[in-house]
Image (spheres, rainbow, N blue to C red):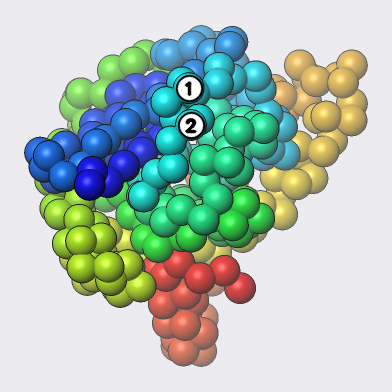
Amino acid sequence: MQKNILVIYYSQTGQLEDIVKNIAKPFENNEQYKVTYYNIKLKEDFPFPWPGDVFFNTFPESYLQIPSEIFPPSDEVLNTKFDLILFGYQVWYLTPSIPIISFLKSGFAENILKDTPVVTISGTRNMWMLSQEKLKVYLKRMNAKLVGNIALVDRHDNYTSVLTILKWLTTGKKEKSGLLPAAGISDEEINGAGKYGEIIKTHFESDDLEDLQPDLVKNGAVEIRPFLVRVEKVGNKIFTVWSNLIIRKKEKRPLLIKFFKVYLMAAIWIISPIVLVFHILLAPFLFVKRRKQREYLQGINLK
């Protein structure tokens, strides 16, 4: 009897689509499985490349997890009981993106996810850890069974990746130019993502999904950078203040968005290095705590 695999994703640039399709390939190439894709589509989609300050203007709704209207999935997706779900998502402002939140807050998400093993797959610049924590909450509420997580990131340093991602978002050009490397996750990692699909398939076929995540971690599916976890924690506190202020002061929104943009750039280039210095100085005293934090964030449990 065929097993039904569902791949859920949203992708503007095509990067995440390539990743999830490569991970799904081992199932695609086996007649024992039927793979169905659900590409989340907004009724009013966001532009790419992002013009002007449009990306920054999505900040309060992104961070506060305010959904937009999406097209429902096909009747096939709605009426099929899936045996495994590969759930691809990206991060906007330290939170699952608006299209992903819109799906999770839709009337049909729980019916699709309930009582089903789920492997989350993210493709991000580098800060995904606390966003994954937010996603875990949604999955738990819907009684989905989180069995694995794969987090592919841009391996360049934090500051280089800021420059390359901004260029990519505003011009649509991912390629290497001048002193800057190509933006996003490397082609090598994207093309090699199929190895994670093989690992998932092996555990799925042996009915051993409980041991899937340690195997994924062992094979490089999740990298934790403690410094970036600290940056995310600080960022969440600051974003909470800014997002609520912008939502409350509707009449001043355009001005506040401009101030937020300036603040965000200052935080990346001025505040972040300061956080890094303290992170390094405190390393000997926080070694055990950070090790436990790394082990937790590499896992799939929710505190």
Choose between 103 and 290: the one closer to the eye. 103
Using residue 273 as the reference point, say whether residue 177 is left or right of it: left
Report the side of 27 relative to 110 (left or right).
Answer: left
Helix, strand or loop at label 2? It is: helix
Label 1 Cα crowd, 10 Å radius (few <14 / some 14-19 / many 20+): few
Percent across and percent down for residue 192 are 12, 46
Q: Who's the residue at 49% across and 11% down the image?
A: 47
Q: Are marks 1 and 2 in contact (CB under 8 Å)?
A: yes
Q: Nearer the viewer, residue 124 or 241?
A: 124
- Residue 123 rendering spot, x and y as whole percentages: 35, 42
Question: Which residue is the site of mark 2?
Answer: 79
Amino acid under label 1?
A: Asp
Give me the C-alpha separation between circle 1 and circle 2.
Answer: 6 Å
- The number of numbered badges drawn on the structure is 2
202 with respect to 241 (left or right): left
Image position, residue 16 (x, y; %):
32, 33
Quadrant housing residue 97: top right
Q: Position of residue 207 (x, y in %)?
A: 27, 68
